[in-house]
Image (cartoon, rainbow, N blue to C red):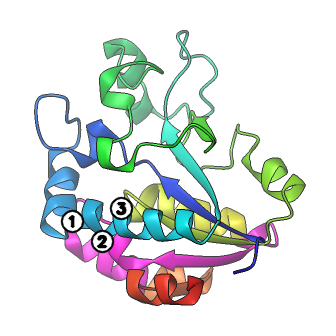
Amino acid sequence: MSSNTALLMLDYQVALAQEGELCLAPPLAAQVRERDVLSTAKRVLEAARAAGLNVFHVRLAFDPTYRLRTNRLARFDGYPANQKMKRGNPEAEFVAELAPLEDEPVVDKGAVNAFIGTPLRDVLAAEGISHVVLGGIATHLVVESTARHASDSGLQVSIVEDLCAAPDPAIHEFAFAKTLPLFGTVTTADEVIGSWS
């Protein structure tokens, strides 16, 4: 296994991936459940750890002032107004089955894209990583934005289809059929695990 590969786990957070009182995106969480994304992601995460890959966990988690967020669209205004997705809030935490280990970095972002306003690209370069494997929710948001940026930054990109979900299955299907193949290699959990053994 090449040490130039990193697994990026994108926005597997309670508010987005777990149905219940802390959920802020019920249609997305329902698709995560229906597609069995969390158990598949756990299998890939465990395989990456066993193969000795670098693993980075990325989440939407705002600073207490909410002023460090780079995305200033109106749809993001509800977060500071309601004090949601603040670093340390329970809804902003990673789901338990995909929680980072102590030696796995956590990248907090204030935008959709995992690279904007974060040190992630510089850290990947410092670690000698040239290939990123992406899984996350939602497909058309963090996954697509991160894949585009990674590709334009000179990284080799693999996107694991069954690690992803969108609130509408048609959006997910369109992204994987039409958009994401323009920015990387579309793959599956079984294929990527097989490539690490």
**Residue 113 seen by the camera:** no
Q: Is residue 106 magenta?
A: no
Between discs 1 and 3, the one toward the N terminus? 3
**Residue 65 rendering spot, x and y as whole percentages:** 55, 9
Q: In the image, 22: left or right of 183?
A: left
**Toward which corner of the image does residue 156 lie, by quadrant?**
bottom right
Disc ID at residue 148:
none
Q: Which residue is rendered at x = 37% and y = 19% of the image? A: 89
Residue placed under numbered mark 3 in the picture: 42
Q: Residue furthest front?
A: 50
Q: CA distance from mark 2 to mark 3?
A: 24 Å
Q: Is residue 125 above or below residue 102?
A: below
Question: Where does the N terminus fall, quadrant-wise?
Answer: bottom right
Between discs 2 and 3, the one toward the N terminus? 3
Q: In the image, 46: left or right of 54?
A: left
**Toward which corner of the image does residue 69 lie, by quadrant?**
top right
Q: Is residue 82 above or below residue 142?
A: above
Q: CA distance from mark 1 to mark 3?
A: 23 Å
Is residue 129 or residue 43 the one in the foreground? 43
Q: Amino acid at mark 1?
A: Asp
Q: Which residue is rendered at x = 64% and y = 22% of the image? A: 68
- Which range is magenta? 151-177
Q: Amino acid at mark 3?
A: Lys
Cβ atoms at labels 2 and 1 below 8 Å apart? yes
Label 2 or label 3, whichever lies nearer to me, is 3
Q: Is residue 41 above or below residue 107?
A: below
Cβ atoms at labels 1 and 3 below 8 Å apart? no
